[in-house]
């Protein structure tokens, strides 16, 4: 049995309404899962460049508009993966895992709201 080194429980969401984007990199991604300590998401790189960012933003659409801006983060992994239709589309897909750090109190509070409102199950 493989040891799980995660400090926080990860969660998946009810729908695809949550998007990830960055101020300092050309990035727009779809959230896979999230925890109080970080998240993972899938994205299509621009000009085959890997993600290089120190801050991300989370935007959720639903009954309530939700946004969480300028979350300090560092990249834990950024790997290429294949989807079924990828060979037809011809573009690379990547999955990235990031770790949050130095969260402000308002970030922690909004992250808690996000997890309570949008989560469907833990992973």
Image: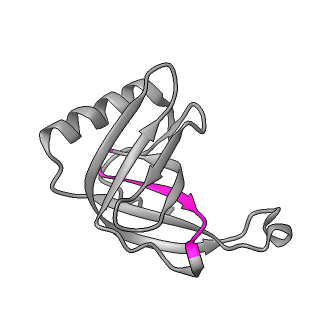
> Which residue: 18% across, 49% down?
103
What is the quadrant of residue 99 in the picture? Answer: bottom left
Magenta extent: 36-46
Horizontal side of 64 relative to 80 (left or right) equals: left
Q: Which of 82 and 91 is in front in this view?
A: 91
Horizontal side of 51 relative to 113 (left or right) equals: right
Q: Where is residue 4 in the image (x, y as percent from the top left)?
A: 41, 59
Instruction: Answer above or below: position of 111 versus 37.
Output: above
Q: Nearer the viewer, residue 108 or 44?
A: 44
Q: Where is residue 44 in the image (x, y as percent from the top left)?
A: 60, 66
Q: Position of residue 56 (x, y in %)?
A: 35, 56
Residue that protrudes farthest toward the bottom in the picture: 48
Residue that protrudes farthest toward the top in the picture: 63
Residue 71 colored magenta?
no
Instruction: Answer above or below: position of 39 versus 58.
Output: below
What is the quadrant of residue 73 in the picture? Answer: bottom left
> Which residue: 53% across, 55% down?
29
Residue that protrudes farthest toward the right in the picture: 88
> Which residue: 47% across, 31% down?
119
Q: Where is residue 123 in the image (x, y as percent from the top left)?
A: 51, 44
């Amino acid at each position: 049995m493989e040891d799980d080194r995660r400090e926080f429980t990860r969660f998946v969401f009810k729908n695809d309404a949550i998007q990830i984007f960055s101020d300092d990199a050309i990035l727009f991604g779809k959230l896979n899962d999230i925890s109080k300590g970080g998240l993972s998401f899938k994205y299509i790189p621009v000009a085959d460049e890997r993600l290089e960012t120190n801050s991300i933003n989370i935007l959720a659409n639903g009954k309530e508009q939700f946004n969480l801006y300028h979350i300090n983060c560092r990249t834990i992994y950024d790997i290429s993966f294949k989807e079924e239709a990828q060979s037809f589309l011809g573009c690379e897909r990547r999955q990235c895992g990031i770790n949050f750090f130095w969260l402000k109190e308002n970030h922690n509070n909004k992250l808690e709201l996000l997890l309570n409102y949008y989560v469907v199950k833990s992973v």
